[in-house]
Structure formats: C-alpha cells, structure tokens
Image (cartoon, rainbow, N blue to C red):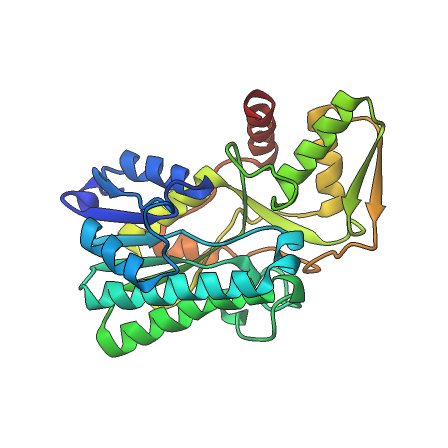
Amino acid sequence: MTDTFWAGKRVCVTGGAGFLGQYVQRRLAAHGARDLFIPRIQDYNLVELADIRRMLADSRPDVIIHLAAHVGGIGANREHPAEFFYDNLMMGVQLMHEAWKQGVGKFVAIGTVCAYPKFTPVPFKEDDLWNGYPEETNAPYGLAKKMLLVQAQAYRQQYGFNAIYLLPVNLYGPGDNFDLASSHVIPAMIRKFITAQEDGSNEVTLWGDGSPTREFIYAEDAAEGIVMAAEAYNGPEPVNLGSGMEISIKDLAGLIARLTGFTGRIVWDTSKPNGQPRRGLDTTRAREYFGFQARTTFEEGLKQTIAWYRENR
C-alpha cells in the first residue's frame, strides 16, 4: 500500500471516536496518515448545518471519511425509526453537500447492509441494492444511509465530485457496544452468556427463532478495507465490505456459548422479530477494485471480543 497517498493530507473522520472510528484511526496511522481531525459530538452536532460548516472550517480536510451514524440493533431501530431516519439523512446529505462546496478532494461515505432489500438473493451483490424495499425493522435507517449513494453518484455525475460509497456488513470486535438496549447481536449474546454464568443461571433467552443468517466482519478488517478504498478506489459503484462467511443466528449462539463456557439452555423468544431472513455479501468487487480481503477468522475474532469484554466491562 502507498503511504504517499496520505502525505500532507488533512483527514477528517466523523464518528472517529466511535467503535469503528477508533480502528479506522489506527489503520490510517499505519498507512502513514499524520494529520487527523476527529470531531467530537459534544463539540459538533453534525445533524445541524451550522455545526457542519464550523467543523469544516476548523478541520479544512482534503479527505472526509464519514463514519458517524445514529445506530442500534433491532430493538433500537423499532423504537426510534424517525430519529434514525432524520439524523442519518441530515448528517450525511448536508455534510456531503458542504464538502463539495468547500472543494474537499475525496468523500468516503459508509453505508450499511441494512440498505439491501429484505429478500435479496445471497450472496448480496451490489447491483441488487434497488431490487426491493429493506427489511421493515431497519428500513428508515437503511434508506437514509442509502441516499448517500444516490447523492455520491449524482454529485460525481454533475460536479465531478470524488465521493465513494462502501457497504460494510455487521461489525464486531473489542470495544463494541455491549449495552443490551442498543447493542447488536454478537455483543448482546456475549453479555447474556457471561452474565448467566456469573449469576449461576442455566438459561439464556434470545430474540427470534434463530433461523436468520448473518455475516460479520471484524472491525479491524473493516477499517483496513475503508482505508484501502480511500487510497485506491475512485468509482461510482457501491462496494461491499464483508468476510464472505454466513452463519445462522442459532449456530452463532452455539458458538458464543461454547467460547464463553456457557453450558445451559438457550430459549428462543419467538414473539420478538427475526430481522432480515438472510445476510451474506458478495465481496468480489472489493477484492477486484482495491485488493481488499478480510483476514481475521470468525472464531479468532470472537475470542478477542469475549476476552476484551471480560477485562473491560
């Protein structure tokens, strides 16, 4: 990889203090980026246009990597659909527009696997993005983030603005959010199994029936893919970032139970939603366009995440 790409470039990473953002910061540093600006939410509310303009004036970036998002699991998506839609749309659309006006050299927009239609053939190919409506529980969030793809392509076509759009699959890893009210499936399961062990409980209740499948990418791998794309990809097409490995929620629960040492019973609460039936990405484009392939095996990534949670909660 070329360290020279980052030489002398000022890089603004929105959401850079968050879970994925901290990994992206480290990968940027490893690739030779020296001038990073990380806007903090207490200093800049990026939903507000005035704050976006002030942030751009303060950071004067050559490259923007837009990671900031208002996100959560199925429960949070069901409870806050309007907030998830408005906050993510306003943040992204206004930031990209102002970045274009300010002459920012490159804009890396981070989308979401939630943008895909509910019944997308597996593995999800980027060309299938518009073949249906997203899964209902996270559609407002998914569609708000998907508008950044439309905007990136439109601004490239009309203004020659270099905006790219990446679609990472579900992330996990050390430093993830383990708050059961807003966490995603892997940290939620890890916490439930470890808590049950400590409480001497021999039963853990999980949402849905365990039949849906998911794909996960270790956060450090995703960060590497984002930095590689920022360096080497300058095209209009959306690009998936994934590991290429699909697993059912039931098998995932069994794996995490084994790795945490939980030997009790798993109860499935079928009154709770399953979410999208299947998720698995076609990762050919990332490999062909900028040479990215995920490296961390799923079991190794889970072990690291479990160890981190035991040490840091």
In the image, 258: left or right of 218?
right
User: Would you place residue 61 above or below residue 36 in this image?
Assistant: below
Q: In the displayed image of the protein, which residue is found farthest to the bottom? A: 158
Q: Observer-nearest residue: 4 or 135?
A: 135
* Image quadrant where residue 155 sits: bottom left
| Residue 41 x, y percent position in the rendering | 38, 47
* Image quadrant where residue 20 sits: top left
Residue 145 visible somewhere in the drawing: no
In the image, 99: left or right of 24?
left
Q: How many marks?
A: 0
Q: Residue at x 77, y 43 (%)?
A: 206
Residue 309 visible somewhere in the drawing: yes
User: Which image quadrant: the N terminus?
Assistant: top left
| Residue 26 x, y percent position in the rendering | 34, 35
Q: Residue at x 39, y 37 (%)?
A: 22
Q: Observer-nearest residue: 51 or 99?
A: 51
| Residue 79 x, y percent position in the rendering | 65, 58
In the image, 86: left or right of 188?
left
User: Would you place residue 50 above or below residue 28 in this image?
Assistant: below
| Residue 17 x, y percent position in the rendering | 39, 40
User: Which image quadrant: the C terminus?
Assistant: top right
Q: Residue at x 34, y 69 (%)?
A: 152
Q: Observer-nearest residue: 49 or 66?
A: 49
* Image quadrant where residue 256 sits: top right
Q: Residue at x 58, y 51 (%)?
A: 72
